[in-house]
């Protein structure tokens, strides 16, 4: 419950340009340089940071889904910031190595680290004066992947003559150098330098490996040509949203040119102001699920030749062949032009005998606390309802959750894998996403998840960690149209991959031409792509915002979320909120909070430095 004692002012504690807000998840913890001064210090860090012993190509780290990382610090004063940056890319457990230099021993440290396969060891001159620490490094490099982050003089480097593990040597010892080195480990920034003199018989002049930037960088707005002062309009709009009770809180994240230049949390989980929103809080993404899970999987299966856009529901689901869904095409489902109704009756149609307050073999599907659905309810009630629903408007654009419910059944049939399992294994884990996924309560505490509606009519509970969408809830929390949860950083990584046309972290997830196809306008009767929502050519609609370019694609979510990618200006914009708490309201839309923040970002970009 430490979050109860965080900053009292819900909008500001230190200026938005401070990296204490951009890089860390705490307020005013440290005070590194800002603006152009930060860029200058970052340049010095780049010019004095050298990668050694990387012939095997361990750096930048790859296969993030398979790594179990521990970050071991003995006496580095910037370890907190260093670890915060590591955790932007993958979960890295901080370990206080100093505790093992007293009563405990380095051998005890090695023993306690047995469940980790990747060790990142922060050391400096003083640390390497202790032969036990050097021995710890050289012993573990034989059995685990070890990365040494060395801050200090060349004299310290000489203590590592017997080390074969990659060494990132940062001669400059500053906060910014710590930030830079942490990001370099994952390829958030490049390593470009070589030794300019002989250090030892092992480390000689002109030695050094170079790496490329392959993941997001976390930096100041000025690093992307944007004046931080011009982004304060976001603060004002977010403050308005909260004061007008359009939402209890929100998180805004901006990526420009592959660099996270703005990431800030506002307000609280609920209007009682007990828990302030944090950058790491997890939100119900609602209909962002359609593109962040179902469409992602569809694109990958399309690349593999396993799904045909002109294939029909009947081609993939034999049970549909004797229904009016038989000849509806995959393309039509993704464009919302199959003629399907928006949804089927859900909670209103539940009978008293369909649910129980406790779980049992007869009632295994948990909808939320104190609400368990009877066995096979989807198979016996919901699925027949979907299959037998009317087809009224084929060829016209009618937004339908059922379209993605049918897509879920198709892709699960093709892969023989539940959608939540497939996307976790094929996308989220390899990308290093730590929060994105379905059924978040299996992995996170409720206080890490932003609550949505206080549903007193049907579910009789505050929905915290349980999907808000009623159809998805009755499907057990995993559905093609809703059910996905994530924090803003994970959303940003996923859509930077899309902005990169299917590639991130040195791996290709989707072919570039497939990204181009699915995100392009596909229909003569709507603005939609395949799965993706897009910029509206009706200019008076100003959708998704007045200044968004015609290349823009993304999606909104009913709970008060959105992500928009604009390739023209190399931009990813993420907005997460819980505007449905405590009850569903319309002010977030009527006040145009999401588009106004998006336009404030464009205006700041246009003004430049």
Image (tube, rainbow, N blue to C red):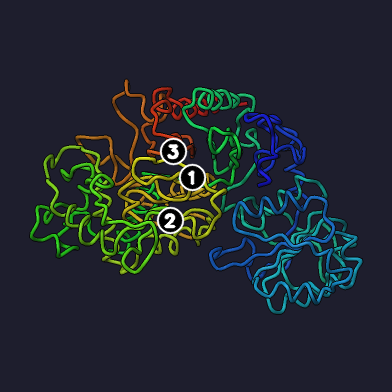
Give the answer, above or below, for where 592 lies relative to 85: above
Closer to the chain start, of discs 2 and 1, is: 1
Secondary structure category for the residue under label 2: strand
- The residue shown at (64%, 72%) is 117
Give the image location of residue 549, x and y in percent: 40, 31
Give the image location of residue 68, x and y in percent: 61, 67
- The residue shown at (41%, 29%) is 548
> In the current view of this chain or complex, which residue is farthest to the top?
540
Give the image location of residue 378, x and y in percent: 25, 59
Q: Quadrant of residue 51?
A: bottom right
- In space, the residues marked 2 and 1 are separated at their CA atoms by 11 Å
Residue that carries the numbered disc 3 in the rendered image = 561
Nearer mark to the viewer, of 3 and 1: 1
- In space, the residues marked 2 and 3 are separated at their CA atoms by 16 Å
Numbered disc total: 3
Q: Quadrant of residue 196?
A: bottom right
Seen from the viewer's position, the closer of residues 598 and 514 is: 598
Q: Horizontal placement of 299 versus 319: left or right? A: right
Seen from the viewer's position, the closer of residues 148 and 531 is: 531
Secondary structure category for the residue under label 3: strand
Residue 566 visible? The answer is: no
Give the quarter of the figure containing the C terminus.
top right
Q: Horizontal placement of 57 versus 170: left or right? A: left
Q: Are marks 3 and 1 in contact (CB under 8 Å)?
A: yes
Residue that carries the numbered disc 2 in the rendered image = 438
Residue that carries the numbered disc 1 in the rendered image = 283
Give the image location of residue 537, x and y in percent: 30, 28
């Amino acid at each position: 419950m430490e979050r109860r004692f965080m900053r009292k002012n819900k909008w500001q504690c230190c200026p938005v340009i401070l990296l204490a807000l951009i890089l860390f998840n705490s307020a005013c913890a440290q005070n590194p340089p800002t603006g152009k001064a930060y860029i200058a210090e970052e340049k010095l860090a780049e010019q004095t940071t050298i990668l050694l012993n990387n012939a095997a190509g361990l750096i930048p780290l790859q296969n993030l889904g398979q790594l179990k990382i521990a970050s071991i610090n003995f006496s580095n004063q910037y370890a907190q910031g260093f670890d915060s940056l590591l955790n932007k890319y993958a979960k890295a457990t901080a370990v206080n190595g100093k505790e093992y230099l007293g009563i405990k021993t380095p051998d005890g440290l090695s023993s306690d680290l047995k469940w980790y396969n990747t060790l990142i060891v922060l050391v400096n001159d003083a640390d390497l004066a202790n032969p036990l620490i050097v021995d710890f490094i050289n012993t573990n490099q034989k059995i685990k992947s070890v990365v040494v982050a060395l801050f200090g003089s060349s004299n310290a480097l000489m203590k590592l003559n017997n080390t074969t593990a990659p060494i990132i040597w940062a001669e400059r010892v500053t906060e910014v150098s710590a930030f830079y080195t942490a990001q370099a480990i994952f390829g958030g920034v490049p390593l470009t330098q070589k030794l300019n003199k002989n250090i030892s018989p092992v480390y000689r002049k002109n030695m050094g490996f170079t790496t490329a930037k392959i993941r997001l960088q976390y930096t100041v707005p000025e690093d992307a040509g944007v004046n931080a002062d011009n982004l304060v309009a976001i603060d004002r709009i977010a403050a308005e949203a909260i004061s007008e009770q359009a939402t209890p809180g929100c998180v805004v994240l901006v990526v420009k040119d592959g660099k996270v230049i703005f990431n800030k949390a506002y307000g609280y989980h609920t209007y009682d102001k007990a828990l302030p929103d944090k950058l790491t809080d997890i939100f119900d993404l609602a209909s962002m699920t359609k593109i962040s899970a179902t469409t992602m999987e569809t694109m990958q299966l399309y690349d593999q030749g396993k799904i045909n856009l002109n294939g029909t529901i009947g081609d993939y689901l034999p049970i549909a062949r004797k229904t009016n869904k038989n000849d509806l095409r995959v393309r039509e489902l993704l464009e919302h032009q199959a003629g399907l109704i928006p949804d089927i009756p859900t909670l209103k149609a539940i009978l008293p005998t369909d649910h129980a307050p406790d779980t049992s073999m007869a009632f295994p599907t948990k909808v939320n606390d104190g609400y368990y659905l009877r066995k096979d309810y989807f198979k016996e009630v919901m699925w027949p309802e979907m299959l037998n629903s009317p087809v009224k408007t084929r060829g016209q654009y009618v937004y339908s959750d059922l379209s993605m419910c049918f897509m879920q059944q198709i892709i699960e049939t093709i892969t023989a894998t539940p959608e939540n399992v497939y996307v976790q294994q094929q996308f989220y884990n390899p990308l290093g996403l730590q929060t994105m996924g379905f059924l978040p309560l299996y992995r996170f505490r409720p206080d890490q998840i932003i609550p949505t509606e206080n549903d007193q009519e049907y579910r009789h509970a505050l929905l915290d960690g349980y999907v808000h969408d009623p159809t998805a809830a009755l499907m057990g929390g995993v559905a093609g149209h809703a059910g996905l949860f994530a924090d803003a950083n994970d959303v940003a990584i996923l859509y930077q991959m899309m902005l990169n046309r299917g590639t991130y972290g040195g791996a290709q997830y989707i072919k570039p031409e497939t990204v181009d196809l699915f995100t392009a306008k596909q229909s003569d009767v709507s603005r939609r792509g395949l799965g993706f929502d897009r910029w509206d050519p009706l200019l008076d609609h100003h959708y998704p915002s007045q200044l968004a370019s015609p290349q823009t694609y993304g999606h909104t979510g009913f709970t008060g979320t959105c992500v928009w990618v604009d390739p023209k200006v190399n931009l990813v914009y993420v907005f997460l909120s819980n505007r449905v708490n405590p009850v569903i309201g319309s002010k977030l839309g009527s006040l145009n909070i999401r588009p106004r923040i998006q336009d404030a970002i464009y205006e700041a970009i246009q003004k430049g430095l």
